[in-house]
Image (tube, rainbow, N blue to C red):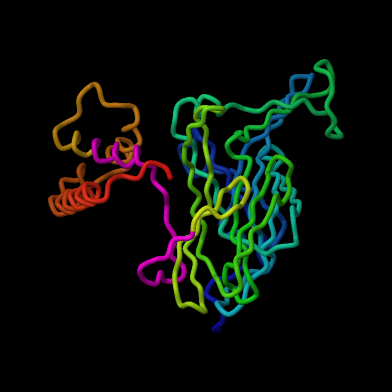
């Protein structure tokens, strides 16, 4: 026995499970055998593509982008080889096709930018239409087929952390899912290792463009020579470093986090304050996500647990105090 506690068995092939949104039982899950041994740990993104033919036939496939490891054997002293792969999954014919996007870098811990929260960008989350012939060329509307991709305009790019030879993260990669390629890479300085990536979506206002989104890529970084931890932030469009913040104490390797916009942070507290007083018919739509979590998925408030309720209240009070002292950051 012995060896790695996390590895894939080469005697078993990888299977994908597709769960229809209207499913009511586990029998509704569509299992598709890829016929390939390997492992997926952190998928990057997936979307649906629909092809409508002139004869009325409709074909729906799933596109999945993910780092893929042919022979995973977790060893903290070395890196496994993960390469970006595109899987094409056909639920009707139950087939899986795969294509390697890039083999030049070894990267994992894939992450996508957060979805836009403001209404104008949400309204633009529509399918992008492209009319394609069988060989991928554009054609007139009265010919073979029409392809519709549900890859949002806000999901064109994704990010992964690049592995070094010793298993540490030494940079990050930016992926373009529209051109189906590795867009660019960022390598950190020698002797500096980073944790998993945090992707931030912030808003800016400019005279020329009005309101627009900015994507930032952040990570905790440790400088071995200085024995010092930093937080670094890069501009997602150009990969230019925006800032480098010296941390007051060492940040243990492996720490990562999530960025929460100020308006969402505030609405969370407003929601719980209203929850204590009782809901009214005029609760804002932005509270819906908290309502679903508390009343549909379950929450201490709905389980008559005075202990958990007191913990929640105390946590909220502490966070409110922190907010009062330090203020709430809105974007960057």
Q: Where residue 232 appears, x then y in whole percent?
A: 49, 59
In magenta stretch: residue 102: no
Picture quarter with the N terminus: bottom right
Tell me if 15 is positioned left or right of 287 in this view: right
Q: Where residue 261 appears, x then y in whole percent?
A: 39, 42
Q: Where residue 135 appears, x then y in whole percent?
A: 87, 34
Tell me if 42 is positioned left or right of 261 in this view: right
Any part of residue 264 in sight:
yes
| 279 vs 24, nearest the viewer | 279
What range is drawn magenta here? Answer: 244-271
Q: Residue furthest top?
A: 142
Q: Residue at x 66, y 28 (%)?
A: 128
Q: Where residue 79 appears, x then y in whole percent?
A: 63, 73
- Asked if residue 84 is positioned above or below residue 29 in the image, the reply reads below
Tell me if 276 is positioned left or right of 254 in this view: left
Rendering quarter of residue 9? bottom right
| 171 vs 101, nearest the viewer | 171
Any part of residue 218 in sight:
no
Picture quarter with the C terminus: top left
Q: Residue at x 61, y 59 (%)?
A: 172
Rendering quarter of residue 55? top right
Tell me if 104 is positioned left or right of 327 in this view: right
Q: Residue at x 70, y 63 (%)?
A: 105
- Asked if residue 303 is positioned above or below residue 127 in the image, the reply reads below
In magenta stretch: residue 258: yes
Q: Residue furthest front?
A: 207
Numbered marks: total: 0
């Amino acid at each position: 026995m012995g060896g790695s506690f996390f590895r894939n068995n080469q005697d078993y092939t990888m299977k994908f499970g597709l769960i229809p949104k209207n499913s009511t039982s586990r029998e509704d899950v569509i299992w598709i055998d890829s016929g390939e041994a390997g492992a997926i740990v952190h998928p990057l993104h997936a979307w649906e593509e629909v092809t409508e033919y002139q004869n009325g036939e409709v074909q729906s496939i799933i596109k999945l982008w993910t780092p893929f490891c042919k022979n995973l054997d977790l060893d903290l002293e070395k890196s496994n080889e993960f390469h970006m792969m595109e899987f094409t999954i056909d639920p009707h014919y139950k087939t899986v096709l795969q294509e390697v996007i890039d083999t030049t870098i070894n990267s994992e811990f894939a992450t996508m930018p957060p979805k836009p929260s403001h209404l104008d960008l949400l309204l633009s989350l529509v399918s992008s239409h492209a009319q394609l012939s069988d060989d991928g060329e554009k054609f007139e509307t009265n010919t073979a087929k029409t392809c519709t991709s549900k890859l949002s305009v806000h999901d064109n790019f994704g990010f992964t952390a690049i592995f070094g030879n010793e298993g540490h993260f030494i940079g990050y990669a930016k992926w373009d899912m529209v051109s189906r390629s590795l867009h660019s890479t960022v390598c950190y300085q020698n002797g500096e290792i980073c944790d998993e990536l945090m992707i931030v979506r912030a808003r800016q206002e400019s005279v020329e463009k009005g309101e627009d989104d900015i994507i930032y890529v952040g990570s905790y970084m440790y400088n071995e020579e200085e024995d010092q931890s930093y937080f670094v932030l890069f501009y997602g469009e150009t990969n230019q470093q925006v800032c480098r913040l010296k941390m007051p104490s060492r940040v243990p390797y492996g720490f990562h986090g999530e960025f929460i916009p100020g308006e969402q942070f505030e609405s969370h507290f407003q929601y719980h304050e209203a929850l204590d007083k009782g809901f009214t018919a005029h609760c804002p739509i932005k509270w819906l996500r908290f309502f679903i979590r508390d009343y549909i998925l379950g929450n201490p408030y709905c389980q008559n647990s005075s202990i958990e309720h007191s913990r929640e209240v105390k946590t909220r009070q502490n966070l409110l105090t922190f907010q009062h002292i330090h203020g709430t950051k809105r974007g960057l």
